[in-house]
Image (cartoon, rainbow, N blue to C red):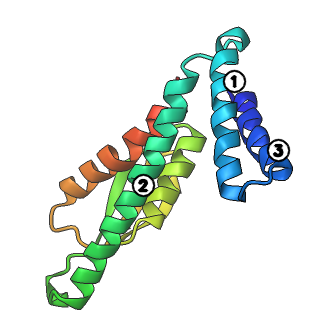
Amino acid sequence: MRKLVVFMLSLGLGVVVLSPWPALLAFGGGIMAGFAVACFLAPFLGVRRFAPRIVALLRYHYLFLWEVMKSSYQVAKTVLVEPLHKLTPDFLVVDIRDLSGLEVFLLANSITLTPGTTTIDVRRREGEMIVHALDTSDPEQVLRDIDDRLRRPILAFTRP
């Protein structure tokens, strides 16, 4: 899997270097060509579910950017419009027992990069991550949002 992704990126960069087109257009074209070749070669190299995992990775990027924009708006609205005494910041515990090191890394950074939440501590032995949320009026909903909008899209591309 890693070799195919490196191949895709290498082909994208190679097209940028050798192409008279603008860099972003050339890189995108190179990535698409690399993706097509990698999809063709994946079964011969023993890589399972290559195309769906790459599509899941792209989906995660778009979902994550949407979450960042949505959270930025919500935090700005909360800070500028709503009375501060209505805020209920608190610490929450996110279960990470079933996640690999890479998945914990991606989830922790995704949580921290999303406005309104910050990963405070990762306790691998206990299988938990401590997260601070700006508004925890419904803590179960915050945990469900983390699971639905961040963890599941990450698992879609990290697990075959």
Q: Give the label on residue 64, or none.
A: 2
The residue labelled by disc 3 is 14
Query: Which residue carries the number 1 mark?
Result: 37
Q: Element at badge 3?
A: helix
Name of the residue lying farthest toward the front: 20
Q: Is residue 72 above or below residue 56?
A: below
Crowd rating for badge 2 (residues with CA inside 10 Å; few <14, some 14–19, many 20+): many
Query: Which numbered disc flags the more N-terminal residue, 1 or 3?
Result: 3
Disc 2 marks a residue whose amino acid type is: Phe
Q: Earlier in the sequence, mark 2 or mark 3?
A: 3
**Dots 2, 3 in contact, CB < 8 A:** no
In 3D space, how far apart are the residues under numbered discs 2 and 3 (Cα atoms)?
A: 28 Å
80 and 24: which one is in front? Answer: 24
SS type, badge 2: helix
Residue type at mark 3: give it: Gly
Rounded to the nearest angstrom, the CA distance separating label 1 from label 3 is 15 Å
- State the image coordinates of residue 24 (x, y, percent, origin top left): 66, 56
Q: Position of residue 88 (x, y in %)?
A: 20, 76
Of residues 146 and 18, the one drawn nearer to the viewer in this rendering: 18
Q: Are marks 1 and 3 in contact (CB under 8 Å)?
A: no
Disc marking residue 140: none
Q: Residue at x 79, y 41 (%)?
A: 10
Q: Is residue 55 above or below residue 112?
A: above
Which secondary structure lies at badge 1? helix
Relative image position of residue 1 (x, y in whole percent)? 67, 26
Above or below: residue 129 compared with residue 49 = below
- Amino acid type, residue under disc 1 in the picture: Val
